[in-house]
Image (cartoon, rainbow, N blue to C red):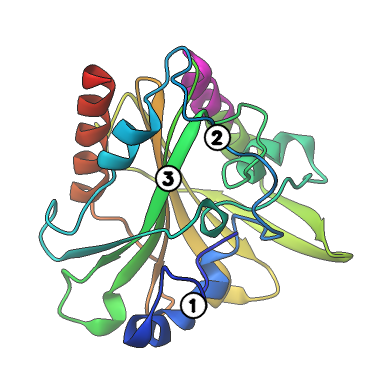
Amino acid sequence: MPIRADHRLLTGRRAVAAAALLPALALATACGGGGKDTPGQVKASGAVPIAKLTSALLTSSDVPHVQVLPAGSKEQLLGAAQKADVAACQPVVDQWSSQPKHPRQVYTGAMVTDTTDKDKGAKTISLTVIASYRAGDAKAVLDELAAAVAACHGYAVVRGGVTSHFVVKPATAAAGLGDQQVSYTIGDTAKGAAGQVLVTVVRAGDTTAAFETVRADHQPASLRSTIPVKQVAKLRTAAKDG
């Protein structure tokens, strides 16, 4: 499930300020509940232990002009399993599902707000999820996601008996963010520009960092490269020390 204003993740004025952005942040997760999976705390092959992964999450002191609010629970981060009506698009749906084809061994996340631009409308908010996988699975996730973004132009999912339609378009990610990176926009056709988000997924070894980003004014969003670069650096350190 995406970040919601009534969860611990958002409180007070932050909740009010972010509330208008939440429908867009809900898009890629195909919100339907957090699912029943409970990532184990035992280190699996190729995985970073949960304590190390949690300490690797970006903090407000890591990048200038960035505020990080960790999720109060995993249910705020990922949605339930969903099936795309177009098979080629399933990796796009799985990216924000708690029950994907390649399961995460452990994961955590936060809301990351970037206020670098003096224009308040240009402020960006990202739902961020970092995860660790069994050896080789993270590469498979990025390989399949890249293929899906190239082949998938749109799909539909059924949630609570209601069919929602989404449009997927490739986007350009800055080079050198990690071992692999995939970027694309996804939009709910019923919501127009207000329903479009930028998704950026970066792999570092057997870990990934995923960002679902919107602008406060609902104009096309961008993710400042300093944010994923710093997050990836912390993931590499956690994997080395784990």
Q: Where is 107 relative to 69, above or below?
A: above
Q: Mark 2–mark 1 contact, CB under 8 Å?
A: no
Where is residue 101? Give x, y as percent: 67, 29
Residue stretch in magenta: 135-144
Outermost right residue: 161
Examine the structure image and report whether residue 125 is included in the region drawn in magenta. Answer: no
| Numbered badge on residue 39 | 2
Where is residue 211? Give x, y as percent: 40, 50
Element on which disc 3 rests: strand
Residue linked to disc 3:
108
Gap in Å between the C-alphas at discs 3 and 1? 18 Å
Q: Amino acid at mark 1?
A: Ala
Q: Residue at x 33, y 87 (%)?
A: 13
| Numbered badge on residue 80 | none
Where is residue 15? Give x, y as percent: 41, 81
Residue linked to disc 1:
5
